[in-house]
Image (cartoon, rainbow, N blue to C red):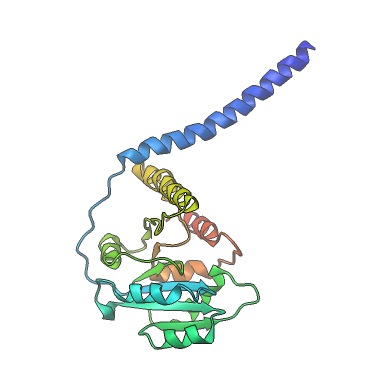
Amino acid sequence: MEILIVVVQILELILFTLLAISAGYFLLFSILGLFYSDKKGKHNPKRSIAIFLPAYKEDAVILDVVHSALEQDYPSDRFQVIVIADSFRNSTLKALKKLPIKLIEVHFKKSTKAKALNKAIQNTQKSYDIAVVLDADNIMQKNYLQEVNKHFVPNAIIQTHRTAKNQNTPFAILDAISEEINNHVFRKGQRTIGLSAALIGSGMVFDYPLLKNLMTNITAIGGFDKELEVAILKRRY
């Protein structure tokens, strides 16, 4: 009986230790996030930027997002909006074709963001300095490209800060809170001590040749950003 009690106590201690390590990890980076200091960007020459918008059946939002993207406070001849339209209605495609963007139509048996991005990169002959990867419902602030250009350095990978557009329902508020917590802990907190910020799948900025090279081996069905993150860390970026 005494042996059983000792075994249970040991198991409890092991479980407590594991939980304490997990809680301590979050506590550490939560505190570190309070000390994050954003470095001021430089006034770099206006680099060429490709904005990739992979979209699957996003007919309801894509036109507004594209119009917003075209209104960036950045020289119009220095950036290109590239929409990867997967399974869109003909009416949406016709409307997109009238806009000054590059439209790539795709149809996959199993649609993934990785497939869409790879197809777009393969069909984009022009080389750019910077690649921005968004989701179909991401709206950039008007000075977004200006800020990206100021903070960019060769071989850079930047995770920009996503904020919730709507907070008009309890679920939307919880989603916004979750987004801010993740940004504080896994990006600000980690960058404070020189670790890499975690990628989140959209609002990502890459050195264009680097993204082109990385994406050739990315085949994830879900969570492509995590597979991309692993590939980046393996190359010690």
Residue sitting at 59 percent across and 67 percent down?
Answer: 219
Coordinates of residue 153 in the picture (x, y in percent): 30, 62
The image shows residue 30, relative to residue 171, as above or below, that is above
Judge by depth and name the residue closer to the eye, 16 or 180. 180
Residue sitting at 47 percent across and 56 percent down?
Answer: 200
The image shows residue 192, relative to residue 43, as above or below, that is above
Quadrant of the snapshot with the N terminus: top right
Left-right relation of 26 to 100: right
* Direction left: furthest residue: 43
Residue sitting at 25 percent across and 51 percent down?
Answer: 39
Coordinates of residue 177 in the picture (x, y in percent): 43, 47
Determine the image quadrant of residue 199. Answer: bottom left
* Direction right: furthest residue: 1
Determine the image quadrant of residue 143. Answer: bottom left
Determine the image quadrant of residue 28. Answer: top left
Residue sitting at 50 percent across and 76 percent down?
Answer: 59
Coordinates of residue 146 in the picture (x, y in percent): 26, 66
- In this figure, what is the number of numbered marks? 0
Q: Is residue 68 visible?
A: yes
* Direction top: furthest residue: 2
Quadrant of the snapshot with the C terminus: bottom left
Coordinates of residue 51 in the picture (x, y in percent): 39, 72
Q: Is residue 125 visible?
A: no
